[in-house]
Amino acid sequence: MMSKAVGISVSLVQRIWRAHGLQPHRMRQFKLSHDPEFGPKLRDIVGLYVDPPAHAIGLSVNEKSQIQALDRTQPGLPLKPGRCGTMTHDYKRNGTTTLFAALDVLEGKVIGRCMQRHRHQEFIRFLNTIEGEIPTSKIIHVILDNYGSHKHPKVRAWLERHPRSSSITRRNRPSGSVLSRAFFAKLSQPFFVSVR
């Protein structure tokens, strides 16, 4: 189409685009927020990532619900020279679990806990876990998404009772850019090892 409009060959158009790093056939999608508080929230989150306050810790908190605990019906045979490891094609289900995780933005450390259910009670227990693992000399800044258990009145009451954890920044969209989402994505991918 471009070659016809300009009157040159297709290959010349492609060479020009390649030389200038242009890829007009590719596009990225984005969604603008209608939240009037979006600007200040974005500044708070970016500020925690780029220039974290002294004597404070920034945690990106998220959950991965309904993780299936699977086990093979029979044990696989081990690796031997000249033979690959084996495993059965079928498995048995051992129920589901929910993983709560808080990713330390600055150091890349993860505080995690698995629980049977995914309600505000479990989220409060996870906040207690965070409170217990972070040194008392540090202020805790938590980045949360807009999930219902995060906005529950009992969770808000917990935050009011714990002043060092009271600095909360909420994202309006759960699909926002948060490091913990990337962490969960890595956990969800199958892990393969090449043995030679």
Image: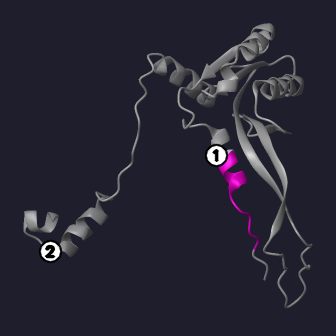
Identify which residue is drawn at 85% across, 16% down.
Answer: 137
How many numbered marks appear?
A: 2
Q: Pinpoint residue 132: horizontal percent, then vertical percent.
A: 89, 24
* Image-based side of 66 in relation to 113, left or right: left
Q: Marks 1 and 2: which is nearer the front?
A: 1
Please tell me whether residue 59 is drawn above or below residue 70 in the rendered image: above
Q: Helix, strand or loop at disc 1?
A: helix
Closer to us: 129 or 196: 129
Amino acid tagged 1: Ala
Quarter containing the N terminus: bottom left
Identify which residue is drawn at 50% across, 17% down.
Answer: 40
Identify which residue is drawn at 47% across, 21% down.
Answer: 38
* Image-based side of 84 in relation to 8, left or right: right
Amino acid tagged 2: Ser
Q: Pinpoint residue 188: horizontal percent, then vertical percent.
A: 70, 54
Magenta region = 184-193
> Does label 1 or label 2 sit earlier along the sequence?
2
Residue behind mark 1: 182
The reply to whether residue 99 is visible in this rendering is yes
Instruction: Look at the image and say whether residue 61 sits in the magenta stretch.
Output: no
Task: Name the quadrant containing residue 84.
Answer: bottom right
The residue at the far bottom in this view is: 82
Task: Name the quadrant containing residue 142.
Answer: top right
Residue behind mark 2: 9
